[in-house]
Image: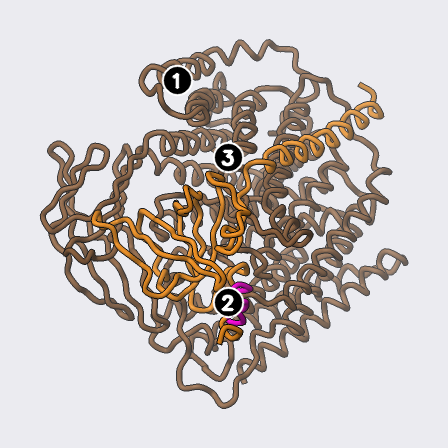
Amino acid sequence: MKPKNQRLVLVSAAMLAVLVAVLLAMWGLRDRVSYFYTPADIAAGKARSGEAMRLGGMVEKGSIRHEPDGVTIRFLVTDGKATTPVVFRGIPPELFREGSGAVAEGRLQSGTFVADTILAKHDERYMPPELGNLTAEHKAGKTLQK
Amino acid sequence: MIAEAGLAALWLAAGLAAYQFVLMLIALRTEVDVVRPMRAVSVVQGALTLVAFAMLLIVFAVSDMSVNLVFANSHSAKPFIYKLAGAWGNHEGSMLMWVTILAAAGAFVALFSRRTSERTLIAALGSQAVLALGFYAFLLIASNPFARLFPAPPDGQGLNPLLQDPGLAFHPPTLYLGYVGLSVAFSLAVGALLTGEVDSRLARAMRPWVLAAWVLLTLGITAGSYWAYYELGWGGYWFWDPVENASLMPWLAATALLHSLNVLAARGALKAWTMMLAVIAFSMSMVGTFLVRSGILTSVHAFAIDPERGTFLLALLAIYVGAAFTLFAIRGASLKEGAPFELVSRETGLVINNLLLSVILGIVFLGTLYPLFVEAISGEKLSVGAPYFNSVAGPLALLLAMLVGIGPLLSWRRERRPILRQLKIPALLGASALVMTIFLAPRIGILPRLGLTVAAFLAAASILPLAGRNPLRAPLSTWGMVVAHFGIAVALVGMAANSAFSSERLAVVRLGEILTVGPWSVQLEDVTPTAGKNYTALEAELRATRGDAAITLHPQTHYYSDPPAETNESSIRTFWNGQLYTVLGRSDPSGGWQLRLWWKPFVTLIWAGGALIALGGALALLGRLIRPRRRRREPDWRERYI
């Protein structure tokens, strides 16, 4: 192959690679992302049942119940406007407490959120950005209610 | 005083970096010889940052609470080693470490680089100084690590107990060395584009840096993965967390660069492509730093939110990447393409390797940044996780792993031998692995099944470059390649076996009760309180039996008081054929304890494979550093290079 043609082939191959990456990523992102919802979103019917999603909010005070099997817990997540019941089988993270923020990954099944994973605040200071806004809104909501 | 000395050293270093930029402009515009001042200033600049970093270590070591950073991240009761690690376990300290490595790398190049022309060296050192200058500005304006606090508080706010872990203490420095080591490749590429001297000499100057950075990145990623595995207590080794992706992306780019550098060094071909990859590799390091340090991610790793810093870092990223790409667009087209090659040749093999790695990099990049774009545009929040990455990038990675077995057998320029014949045994092994998994484990997923198949093929094929010759006579770099490629097969077996054959149990058990997992029966014998230096703990005693073998494990839950937190410390026992992984959860109101158990066959091969890959890189590096001296005696540079 002549050097000039060789370069042409290489440049087209590189372009093709970029194109393939973008197309594959678009195809993959179409149905493999999980959206973040708040209890208010779910109450408004924005979330489809059975779709992988994340739920974020505060764990309502006094709502954690332990099932008899000892490893399943049920609790309510609230954003100040609505609440969603959550069921989780597993060992919750260290900083999972009533009255503090949490993000649950899982699916909605007939009105209850079945969580596969629970992410809590990583340390005393860190909060997921999604939750950061939420807490501000939540506090604002509370003040209004008073 | 110590903190002020550190700050002064930083200001001086920033001034010298600006001076280096001027020197570079002089050298590029005039005929004035500035190589000696350039080298000298680079070295002094590097030394000054080392002084600044040493000062930070000292204020942490003596717990000087009048320094805000120490107050916020340390505590006088903390073990000494974690006091030191606290210096880089936070935003400001880690950015200081970043710039220290950057400037020290520049000093190293100035001292030891004899492989490039002086003009390219000057331009590269100038580019390195400009990189450092931006990060000095970031430190001095937006993230001063030496800021004082008045009056000095009596004691600090402690360090997150999750971070009090030897793995985490040494993980960031390793990764940072890798990240920032790639800056030398970036600067050499920018320098060579400025002077137009993109040739095999440059590739040989760049290669040791890329190899070293790549080895450290590999080690950092492997160690980080093991840390997440044993520390988080979730039993997983890779979560596709954006922070993990931030280290994977530079690694993918550096892997591609490493391979295309060989083409440039041996054949003088792929000039523009290689320069592009050198720019991209370090750009990915900066993207990673931006993602981790700006705190824009929803991630278990990102510690704090501070939009001002995020904007500053984003601006730096845009300026550097933008400038490098502009330079590439202006100069890249005028580069002469090197020696031609035919369709079936090692060059083509390496081009395919590069294309696949680039596609995988693109997929990871887009998947990592997509949630940020969507949120910025529509305000909708979403996350992209394992389902996307595994199903989109996984098959491509498997294809790449298969081609890894074939590529090294090809010769440069054109292949005339029937190389497929050599692959008979590996192909047979792969096919029998496939048949065996179909019969013995009919229910496992498609990716693990193909993973085991490809791993069997690659394990045999990767050794072929040593076959038919005296292995002791083979160059170290060939050994490095074989070991690294074999490591891929090893890691692949670990990943596939872990995903196909792991078993998990989670239940509440009372004292004396037995839980089974995989081949093991695990009895909870006792739970007792105990204490460490700065925590109290509950410790379970588990007796696990398999056949005649009986072992005892002690998973713990730690309770820290400053700041209040608790962590689950898993207890893991390794056997030749897998790991037994145990976690103690909380107590149950009925008097039992939550226990979580995993039996993970061959999971350790994942990190053993990672270590082999790094070892391969280290061998190749050693070979590259020793070899040039030998070549001066017998100047036959046309022989097989890899």
Label 2 to label 3, Cα distance in Å? 36 Å
Mark 3, Cα crowd under 10 Å, few <14 / some 14-19 / many 20+, is some
Q: Which chain does the numbered disc 1 sit on?
A: B
- Tell if the residue under mark 2 belongs to the same chain as the one under mark 3: no
Instruction: Write the start and end of the magenta stretch as one range.
Output: A132-141
**Contact between labelled residues 3 and 1, with CB atoms less than 8 Å apart:** no
B572 relative position to B93: left or right: left
Front position in the image: A109 or B587: A109
Q: CA distance from mark 2 to mark 1?
A: 56 Å
The residue under label 2 is A138
x, y (%) of residue B248? Answer: 55, 44
- Residues at discs 2 and 1 both on one chain: no
Q: Residue at x 75, y 57 (%)?
A: B319
Q: Amino acid at mark 2?
A: His
Seen in the picture, residue B638 relative to A71 is either above or below; the reply is: above
The residue lying at 46 percent from left, 25 percent from top is B471
Magenta run includes residue A138: yes
For chain A, what colour was chosen? orange
Q: Is label 2 or label 3 in front?
A: 2
